[in-house]
Image (cartoon, rainbow, N blue to C red):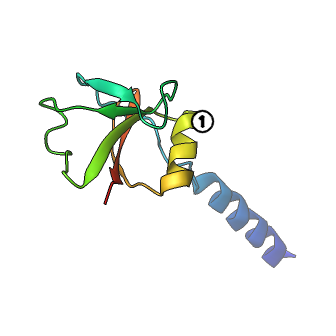
Amino acid sequence: MTGIGVCAYVLALTGCVETAPEVAISEPDPELVFVRGYRGAADECQLVGETAFTVDFLDDAADLVACPTGSAAMASLMAETGAPMLTQTNSFTLFSIGIR
């Protein structure tokens, strides 16, 4: 009987220790230059131009795209392209999408 009590205690502690990963980013929103909707005019994910913040993420073989963090547009872009996330700010997640 003592073994059952110990197992229940261990399971309870283990359940309490697990925490959800933190997804909120405290990085302030930088100045971003939005060129156009990435997949179409109404796309929330936008092609991003060069700024002091984006210069290190730009690549001549890839498009730099910013989506509102956590949006349905972001989820669909990730599913469609498999693009790697480069960085996040309070409002946007930036992706590099190969064009070659």
> In the drawing, does residue 87 fall left or right of residue 68?
left
* Residue 61 can be seen in this image: yes
Residue drawn where x is 11% and y is 30% of the image:
52
Residue 34, image quadrant: top left
Q: In this view, does 93 lie above or below 4?
A: above
Q: In this view, does 87 lie above or below 13?
A: above
Instruction: Please say whether residue 29 is visible from this viewpoint.
Output: no
The quarter in which the C terminus is drawn is: bottom left
Crowding at dot 1, Cα within 10 Å, few <14 / some 14-19 / many 20+, comes out as few
**What kind of element bears circle 1?**
helix
Taking the image as shown, residue 13 lies to the left or right of residue 84, namely right
**Residue 63 percent across, percent down from the top left:** 30, 45
Residue 91 % position (x, y): 40, 26
Quarter the N terminus occupies: bottom right
Task: Looking at the picture, tell me which residue is in the foreground, 22 or 58.
Answer: 58
| Residue type, mark 1 in image | Ala
| Location of residue 16 with respect to 29 vertically, above or below | below
Q: Going 64% across and 62% down the picture, which residue do you hit?
A: 14
Q: From the image, tell me which residue sits under label 1.
A: 72
25 vs 8, nearest the viewer: 25
Residue in the picture at 52% in, 24% down: 42
As drawn, is 39 to the left or to the right of 75? left
